Image (cartoon, grey):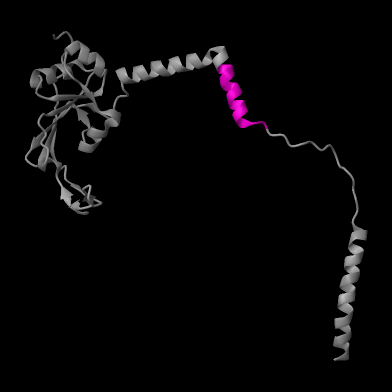
Amino acid sequence: MIRSCRLALVLPFALVGLAATSPASARDYGQQGTVWAIAEPDLLAQIHARLAALEASGETRKLNERLKQRTIARVNRPNPVAGLARAETPRSWLFDPTISVSEAITDDKGRVVIAAGTRVNPLDSVSLRQPLVFLDGDDPEQLAWATRTYSNKAKFILVAGAPLELMKSRQRRFWFDQDGKLVHRFGIRAVPAVVEQQGRQLQIREHSLPRKRDGQP
């Protein structure tokens, strides 16, 4: 018991002594190497200077002109839908456009119009009044067949070609299936293809056209 008390008295004095000698043991090693001040360039100032240089050199005008020309070219001739071919054999199937509503649809007063999980067929409300004819606008045979078969009784939807040029030359409207959203939705793999309503479903047909032989008009 006496030894424990002595130890308790010695420890505080030892800690005080250690604290007293710590400053004396610190050393100043001086400056090692060159010290540089931290200086980061202003990012906004750099961007402004770069834009001012582009404007002064006329590069901005050139960039804008190239962007304009690319946009005009894309409008005149959109990217063709990838993965489609000219139909070699006829194919026909029925497509059910019914969808399942994932979330409840409400009116402006919050009243539920269509409950979640309800299956809805758009053809029950809006009918497909005209056939949809999907075709390659760069294929004269497909254009001739579609014009001869449907005249102005269908909507011509291009998957390749120049819609504005065709509208001007043929004096009728042409649409373009951007990114192939419709053909992918309907499962169309070849053109020309025609979509028509049949009751509460859509009848889809891929038509195989006879190819003209060399020298045949």
Indicate left or right for 62 with 49 as reference.
Answer: left
Range of residues picked out in magenta: 41-54
| Residue at (35, 17) in percent of width and height | 72
Does residue 53 show up magenta in the picture? Answer: yes
Does residue 10 show up magenta in the picture? Answer: no
Q: Nearer the viewer, residue 42 or 150?
A: 42
| Residue at (56, 17) in percent of width and height | 54
Q: Nearer the viewer, residue 215 or 78?
A: 78
Q: Toward which corner of the image does residue 136 lie, by quadrant?
A: top left
- The main secondary structure of the magenta stretch is helix
31, above or below 3, in the image: above
Instruction: Point out residue 97 in the picture as x, y percentages from the top left corner.
Output: 16, 42
Instruction: Point out residue 50 in the picture as x, y percentages from the top left corner.
Output: 59, 22
Indicate left or right for 52 with 109 as reference.
Answer: right
84, above or below 122, in the image: above
- Tell me the quarter of the image containing the N terminus: bottom right
